[in-house]
Amino acid sequence: MQFGVGLIDVTPGSARTTYLVVTDIEAAHRELTDRGLAVSPIRHKTSTDDWQGDYSPGVERERRNYASCIDFADPDGNTWIQERGFTRTPSTACRRI
């Protein structure tokens, strides 16, 4: 994923529902709101085994992978979903820059 000006030739706001996986959804929510973005409340899939599109408020109690999420739009209008996911071991993790 690249961020910058003039990297691609698309209309601003045309990227929809891009997923980002984070290990701490509460910290991600806090950081985005601290930066002034309008972020949805944290919600989780109500039924994780056979999910039917239903959500409940807050972080999923057992902290299952991909069960809790937030969403927001960036200043260009692109929409993003952040999900709480698994933690990789350091040998397979991407570098944070």
Image (tube, rainbow, N blue to C red):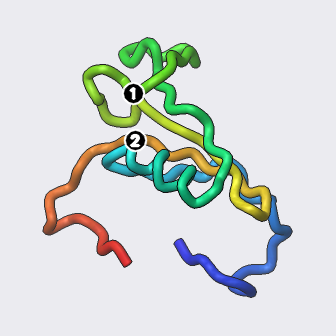
Residue at image position (56%, 50%) is: 33
Judging by the rendered image, the residue that carries numbered circle 1 is: 59
Earlier-in-chain disc, 1 versus 2: 2
Q: Which amino acid does label 1 sit on?
A: Val
> 13 or 70, which is in the foreground?
70
Quadrant the C terminus occupies: bottom left
* Residue at the extreme right: 11
Image-based side of 76 in relation to 65, left or right: right
In the rendered image, residue 36, in percent from the top left (x then y), is placed at 64, 56
* Residue at the extreme bottom: 6
Q: Tally the marks.
A: 2
Residue at image position (39%, 35%) is: 66
* SS under mark 1: loop
> 18 or 27, which is in the foreground?
27
> 58 or 77, which is in the foreground?
58
Q: What residue type is labelled 2?
A: Glu
* SS under mark 2: helix
As displayed, is residue 94 above or below residue 62?
A: below
- Badge 2, how many Cα within 10 Å: few under 14, some, many 20+? some
Residue at image position (39%, 18%) is: 48
In the rendered image, residue 91, in percent from the top left (x then y), is placed at 14, 68
Q: Quarter of the image holding residue 77?
A: bottom right
Judging by the rendered image, the residue that carries numbered circle 2 is: 26
Task: In the rendered structure, find residue 40 and report the number of the disc placed on it.
Answer: none
Residue at image position (51%, 16%) is: 56
Mark pair 1, 2: CA separation: 8 Å
- Badge 1, how many Cα within 10 Å: few under 14, some, many 20+? many
In the rendered image, residue 35, in percent from the top left (x then y), is placed at 58, 60
Q: Do the residues labelled 1 and 2 touch (CB within 8 Å)?
A: yes
